[in-house]
Image (tube, rainbow, N blue to C red):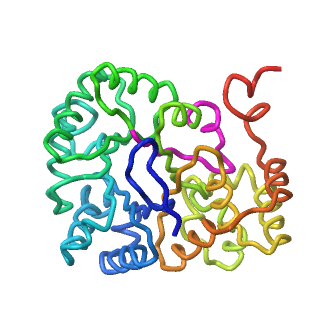
Amino acid sequence: MIYTQLGRTGLRVSRLALGTVNFGGRVEEPEAHHLMDHALERGINLIDTANIYGWRVHKGHTEEVIGRWLGKSPARRDQVVLTTKVGDPMSEGLNDRGLSARNIIASCEASLRRLGTDWIDVYQMHHLDRSVGWDEVWQAMDLLVAQGKVRYVGSSNFAGWDIATAQAVAQRRNSLGLVTEQCVYNLVTRYTELEVIPAAQAYGLGLFVWSPLHGGLLGGVLRKMRTNSAVKSAQGRALEALDAQRDTIEAYEKLCADHGLDPAVVGMAWTLSRPGVTGVVIGPRTEQHIEGAIEALECALPESLLAELDVLFPPVGRGGPAPDCWLS
């Protein structure tokens, strides 16, 4: 396993994070426990979840599953870096959502109970809440840090200017501010290169990518559909994107085959190779998915293949950060 520091912090994390969005509904609890065991054995020390995960059973279910796994061994909590998220609606309650100080603090307490732990390593805002001022957000987060319930604060799905605004207020309050951003980024969705990655680099944030295979679209979807083995890639965002990009994906899978590489390995290895990317969040359903991600982490794509991928999946405009990418 390859480890790195999380942004400008001294916290060391694996470049692969075990995402748990599939726990509950797609991966039942015994198998979820087995996957966490296997990930830990293979050196993955970062476990990423959210208070809303497990909604196919009930919201909060995934945190409960992780909590029962942690409870099996007192040593496990010290072995893992645990992240969760706040902000999505947890009920029909008027204040059971968003980033008000009330909901941030109440949601943290509820996550701690479900996880069976005294602290959260990185507490992430799942989405921006433009109805709440940053002074209120940081007042709540600073309190949780001072109480020892949260070690660091992160964001997810923020724009570059949101990161800048959050950091400006945090600095004024003498707070550490954001230490990580979690965003979507892959060969198909390269908008992150414009401003989010530059902002994360400028402010010293670690950047973890979710959906590095665009929901399975880049994981050999056409081959899997031909063999009736497609699961996640045959539905949702991946299927919608496939309708518009079938020719490109067909060319992509052929290109990977010509280089003797699995499409899932290529897609993830490309994301891991990008400047500013700390690591990726994987959402495995099997041990093989974890092993495939480790293979991608260890795979150095040849320059010729990287160039061909840029032709198939061109960057926005001229490429690189804004505004240079669109200047003539």
**Corner quadrant of residue 75:** bottom left
State the residue in front, 259 or 202: 202
Q: Residue furthest front?
A: 10
Picture residue at 82% right of the left edge, 59% below the top = 305
State the residue in front, 139 or 10: 10
Apparent side of residue 93 relative to residue 267 in the rendered image (left or right) = left
Question: In x, y percent, where is residue 174?
Answer: 28, 25
**Corner quadrant of residue 141:** top left
Picture residue at 61% right of the left edge, 58% below the top = 213
Apparent side of residue 137 relative to residue 244 in the rendered image (left or right) = left
Asked if the stretch drawn in magenta spans residue 272, the answer is no
Q: Which residues are magenta?
A: 179-196
State the residue in front, 108 or 218: 108
**Corner quadrant of residue 179:** top left
Picture residue at 67% right of the left edge, 74% below the top = 224
Question: In x, y percent, where is residue 235?
Answer: 56, 61
Apparent side of residue 258 relative to residue 103 in the rendered image (left or right) = right
